[in-house]
Amino acid sequence: MLRKVVLILALGLTMTACNNSASEQDSAVLDFIIPTDEGQVLLSKYRGEVVYLDFWATWCGPCRDSFPWMNQMQDKYGSQGLNVVAVSLDTDHALARRFADELSANFTIGYDDTGSIADLFKVKGMPTSVVIGRDGRVAEIHQGFNDSKMVPYEGSIKKALK
């Protein structure tokens, strides 16, 4: 069932966010399935690469602003191993798909209409993004999006790609 998110915790989640980032010691290797229009994606498929996991919703203004930036990041760093995966928390997948199409998303769009994946990361606001390093561990967590956050967020991507 595509709407049901299957969660498989490789080590369990013991992540504690501090100043919107998680230290390597506080992170846990996570593996879970993200439903997409193309089928289900197991996060571990990206092992050895960097994932920018973004939680968003169609009603979120800053989310709309973040999509062009995420397109730029995917274009700029995709060849170095970056995979942007944007997970909608909307219950209407068609509405979320239209939003992503309108903004010409060039990255994976997933769905978490039950909030199960977002709960793992204690998402409190949108957008919330999680940078997952090549080792599958959470490197940083970011909350919100605006012009002043573009440079530091890109910096965390570059750091994870090293």
Image (spheres, grey):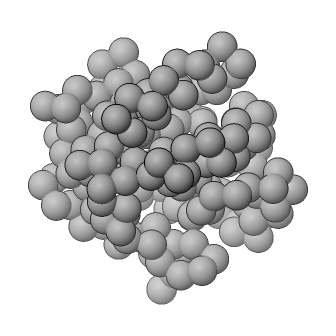
Q: Give the residue at the far right of this rendering.
A: 102
52 over 141 or under it: above or below: below
Residue at point 72% right, 31% down? 62
Residue at point 75% right, 65% down? 97
Question: What is the number of callouts on the image?
Answer: 0
Q: Position of residue 12 (x, y in %)?
A: 16, 53
Q: Give the residue at the far bottom of this rendering.
A: 1
18 over 113 or under it: above or below: above
Q: Which quarter of the picture shows residue 66? A: top right
Q: Position of residue 115 (x, y in %)?
A: 48, 55
Does 80 sit left or right of 93 as displayed? left
Q: Give the residue at the far front of this rendering.
A: 79
Q: Can residue 60 be seen in this snapshot? A: no
Q: Position of residue 53 (x, y in %)?
A: 48, 48
Residue at point 59% right, 19% down? 151
Q: Where is the C terminus found, in terms of image quarters?
A: top left
28 over 41 or under it: above or below: above
Residue at point 47% right, 48% down? 80
Q: Position of residue 58 (x, y in %)?
A: 75, 49
Does 22 sit left or right of 85 as displayed? left
The residue lying toward the viewer, choosing from 41 and 128, is 41
Q: Can residue 138 be seen in this snapshot? A: yes
Q: Which quarter of the picture shows residue 96? A: bottom right
146 over 76 or under it: above or below: above
